Image: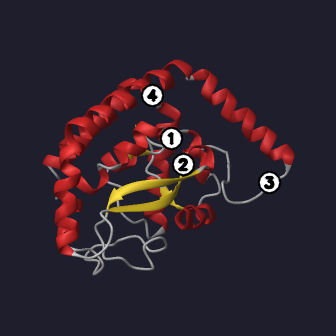
Amino acid sequence: MQQPELNISPILKKPDAVLFSENAIITSFVATRRKYLAVKRAIDLLVSLLCIVGLLSWLIPLVGILIKLDSPGPVFFKQKRVGLKGRIFHCLKFRTMIVNPDADERPAVLNDSRITKVGRILRRFHVDELPQMFNVFMGTMSIIGPRPHMISDCVRFGFVITTYDFRSLVKPGITGLAQVNGFSGPANDYESIMNRYYWDAEYVRRAGILLDMRIIARTFINMFYKKG
């Protein structure tokens, strides 16, 4: 599997010469895709605004009541994630777990005892991800892109794949090429980390409107017709 030879670490401090080289790569990347990125941002703004006004305006109160009745704690779960060019932002989701001190360090796994009854339903239909439309509207995320990881996961994955930060050349997304190819949820072994990185890196290299449309279509297909 061919991988791009690039390492842009949001965690570790680097010499000025290395930072200059990486900044030049980022500048060149943006310059070659300026039109695509402008169109993509316009689509993100339009879709996220429609979703916020037409869906979340009534869904948040409804889901909020169910979450509150199911377990004590806030309606939303905010978590620091690594985004574009390694910048840290707060990713917004409906809370699906009981309030616990490990939420920022230990991702949910299958049959996780921390997940609430309502949380399992929200996760099953990916409703918990919908508040990220606010992230899309604010510009910290896109609808399509590599999924944003917790800081601890980025550090862990970076030890496995030295070029892992190549995926941060684009905004993180609600869904992406890795997810529609079956790589979602926790990455707990070398193979799952490598496979997810491979598809994320493929997206960075091939990103375009047609690919984004294909990812959207496959996302809906996977949601309603999940394979065994």
What x and y, as percent, mark residue 128?
A: 27, 57
What residue did someone put label 4 on?
A: 41
x and y percent of residue 218 in the render?
25, 39
Q: Mark 2 or mark 4, which has the lower sequence index?
A: 4
Circles 1 and 2, Cβ within 8 Å, touching? The answer is: yes
Above or below residue 21? Residue 120 is below
* Residue at image mark 2: 83
Disc nearer the start of the sequence (3/4): 3
Left/right of residue 214 with respect to residue 201 in the rendered view = left
Pointer 3: residues within 10 angstroms few (<14), some, or many (20+)? few
Q: What separation in Å lies between label 2 and label 4 (alpha carbons)? A: 15 Å
Q: CA distance from mark 1 to mark 2?
A: 6 Å
Q: Earlier in the sequence, mark 1 or mark 4?
A: 4
Instruction: Please identify, in this view, whether the residue under mark 3 or under mark 4 is nearer the observer.
Output: 4
> Which label number is shown at residue 171?
1
Q: Quadrant of residue 152?
A: bottom right
Task: Kindly report which numbered mark, 1 or 4, lies closer to the viewer in this rendering.
Answer: 4
Q: Nearer the viewer, residue 216 or 75?
A: 75
- Label 2 Cα crowd, 10 Å radius (few <14 / some 14-19 / many 20+): many
Residue at 46 percent of width and 39 percent of height: 138
* Mark 1 to mark 3 CA distance (whole Å): 22 Å
Image side of residue 212 versus residue 72, left or right: right
Q: Secondary structure at mark 3?
A: loop
Between the residue at mark 3 and the residue at mark 4, the CA separation in whole angstroms equals 30 Å
Dot placed on the residue nearer the N-terminal end, 1 or 2: 2
Marks 1 and 4, Cα distance to the nearest angstrom?
A: 10 Å
Label of residue 14 in the image:
3
Identify the residue at image location x=20%, y=41%. 55
**Which mark lies nearer to you, 3 or 2?**
2
Q: Amino acid at mark 1?
A: Lys
- Amino acid type, label 2: Gly
